[in-house]
Image (cartoon, helix red, strand yellow):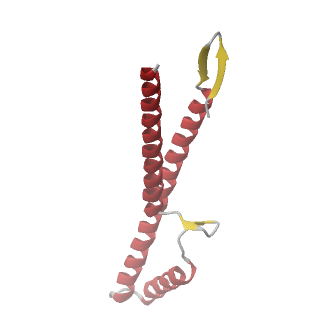
Amino acid sequence: MLSVYKTQDTMVESKIPTLYLSIWLIKTQILSNMLSSNFEKFYVAMKNVQDSCAYISKSNCSDDLKKWCKNVLRLYRVGFSKMSVCGMFYVDFPLLWKLQSLMSQYIIIIVLLLISTVDMEKMSNANK
């Protein structure tokens, strides 16, 4: 990812691609956090609607209200499903946890690789 070139026997690294990549990763993480949390709020609201309609349909209310609540429950059973991305995975709170877990694993691996690279450079400089 780093553009490396030589000028007058010194290595110069261009940090711009790394900066763009970091900004893109942060933006993607923020957007996925917002989407997952808002979809989870929507799913909780839908569950509350289902619970309220079930309660109303069993209470002493007018027949029209009971009929309306039963229709809402029927539509919920038949027509509601969690949002999915191309049918591959659902957009909900566990997706957020999986993405954060994946991101932290990659960060740990990259840090370990950088540490080992720095140690190897120190050892080679010490042997000279």
Identify the image quadrant of residue 5.
top right
Left or right: 110, with 12 as reference point: left
Q: Which residue is more in the foreground, 56 or 114?
A: 114
**Residue 24 appears in which quarter of the rendering?**
top right
Q: Residue at x 61, y 27 (%)?
A: 16
> At 56% from the left edge and 83% from the top edge, which residue is drawn?
78
Residue lying farthest to the left in this orientation: 60
Residue 60 percent coordinates (x, y): 33, 88
Above-or-below relation of 76 to 15: below
Residue 109, x across and y down, in percent: 45, 45
- Relative to 94, does residue 31 appear above or below in the rendering? above
Residue 71 percent location from the top left of the image? 51, 85
89, 7: nearer the viewer: 7
117 or 29, nearer to the observer: 117
The answer to whether 100 is drawn above or below residue 114 in the figure is below
Quadrant in which the N terminus appears: top right
The residue at the far front in this view is: 127
For the residue pair 19 and 111, the one nearer the viewer reads as 111
Q: Position of residue 57 (x, y in %)?
A: 39, 86
Q: Residue at x 44, y 22 (%)?
A: 127
Give the vertical position of 36 relative to 115 (above or below). below
- How many numbered circles does the render carry? 0
